[in-house]
Amino acid sequence: MKIEVFDIPEEGLALAVEETPKIEGVKIIQPFKAILRVDKRGVEVFIKGVVSGEVELQCGRCLKEYILPIKTLLEVTYHPVQHLNKEELIELKRDEMDVDFYREGLIDTEDIIRDQILLNIPMKPLCSEDCKGLCTICGTDLNYSECGCIVQEIDPRMAILQSLLRRMKANG
Ligand SMILES: [Zn+2]
Ligand SMILES: [Zn+2]
């Protein structure tokens, strides 16, 4: 939903919303929930709350899809973007950890939830810290079975020597 900054009452707002933001490479099966407390002071808006839900990611090692639950607290101060010049924007970003901006008097709760999901998704998703991944030779999922492939790295100089020896034997 979109929060109209102008309509936020003196005593603030308590919101419970559900959103399913679109994020590339991330599957969201059920809507994310957010419980938010919204307060306004002048043109600044303070939003505090909790965002929770689940995303489906693909493990970077075994390529299996897995569910990652996310539950996170947020505390963000919103400033109207048109009231600030560039130096002020940079200044704000440095001073406050969680700063965001709103445009045209609107704050979209879908954006709030999307930001929290993005902050909580690992750079390299893994179904488990000790996922063994796939065999690079036969593709067997090593979490379930062993394939017996021997992964050996042959020194290229040794390979030349081996083929020379083989040829000598063949000729002799
Ligand atoms: Zn895995
Ligand atoms: Zn194998």
Image (tube, helix red, strand yellow):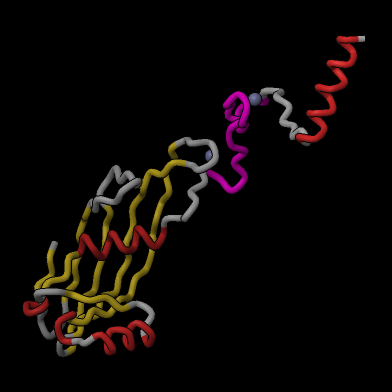
- In the rendered view of the protein, which quadrant contains the C terminus? top right
Question: Considering only vertical position in the picture, is 26 above or below 97?
Answer: above
Q: Along the horizontal axis of the image, is 151 left or right of 47?
A: right
Question: Considering only vertical position in the picture, is 130 above or below 42?
Answer: above
Q: Position of residue 41 (x, y in %)?
A: 18, 88
Q: Position of residue 63 (x, y in %)?
A: 48, 36
Q: Across the whole image, how many numbered discs are drawn on residues?
A: 0
Residue at the left extreme of this rendering: 7
Overall secondary structure of the magenta section: loop
Which residue is depicted at the point 31% across and 48% down?
24
Q: Is residue 138 magenta?
A: yes
Q: Which is more toward the observer, 77 or 61? A: 61
Residue at the front extreme of this rendering: 171
Q: Which is more toward the observer, 150 or 41? A: 150
Q: Position of residue 132 (x, y in %)?
A: 62, 38
- Which quadrant does ligand 2 occupy? top right
Give the residues drawn in magenta, as a range. Answer: 127-146
- In the rendered view of the protein, which quadrant contains the N terminus? bottom left
Question: Considering only vertical position in the picture, is 105 above or below 90?
Answer: above
Q: Quadrant of residue 161?
A: top right
Q: Quadrant of residue 84?
A: bottom left
Q: Is residue 66 magenta?
A: no
Q: Position of residue 77 (x, y in %)?
A: 27, 80
Q: Along the horizontal axis of the image, is 119 left or right of 132?
A: left
Which residue is depicted at the point 25% across and 85% down?
86
Q: Quadrant of residue 95?
A: bottom left
